[in-house]
Image (cartoon, rainbow, N blue to C red):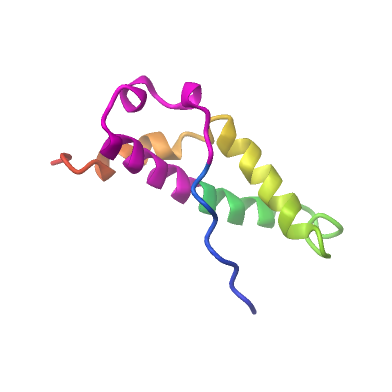
Amino acid sequence: MMMSSPPTPPSVPASALPASVREGSKADRQAYTAALGFEQMLLGQLVGEMLPKGTMTEGPHAAAMQEAFTGGLIANGGIGLAAQLYPSMRKDAS
């Protein structure tokens, strides 16, 4: 089985970021982007498993279809996992 390359960091409109991240430092934005990247990878796996077997999970366009579903979820704020992970990913977290 061939492993796919890791997804590119998610592109999320600034308005979808929490205010503390928008107003924070570059390191804050990088930490939140990393948390979103993890959420994106997890959602990609979940989307792949939840879709019924058929044209959306098999064939030449399956990966693009799954990435579109995942990208749509992330672009609209995801499922909240990144917001839960972010505090522990900040460099100044104790």
**Which residue is located at x 53 percent, y 39 percent?**
11
**Which residue is located at x 63 percent, y 77 percent?**
2
| Left or right of 93 on screen, residue 8 | right
Majority SS type along the magenta span? helix
Quick one: quadrant of the C terminus? top left
Quarter-of-image position of residue 23: top left
> Does residue 91 belong to the magenta stretch?
no
Residue with the most extreme bottom position: 1
Q: Residue 25: x and y, percent?
A: 26, 31
> Does residue 13 belong to the magenta stretch?
yes
Quick one: quadrant of the N terminus? bottom right
Residue with the most extreme left position: 94
Q: Is residue 38 above or below residue 62?
A: above
| Left or right of 57 on screen, residue 15 | left
Q: Residue 22: x and y, percent?
A: 36, 24
| Left or right of 94 on screen, residue 89 | right
Q: Residue 72: x and y, percent?
A: 65, 37
Q: Residue 29: x and y, percent?
A: 34, 36
| Left or right of 27 on screen, residue 92 | left
**Which residue is located at x 57 percent, y 48 percent?**
43
In front of the other: 41 or 53: 41
In front of the other: 53 or 83: 83
Query: For the magenta stretch, what is the residue range?
Result: 11-39
Quarter-of-image position of residue 5: bottom right
Q: Is residue 21 above or below residue 38?
A: above
**Which residue is located at x 56 percent, y 38 percent?**
74
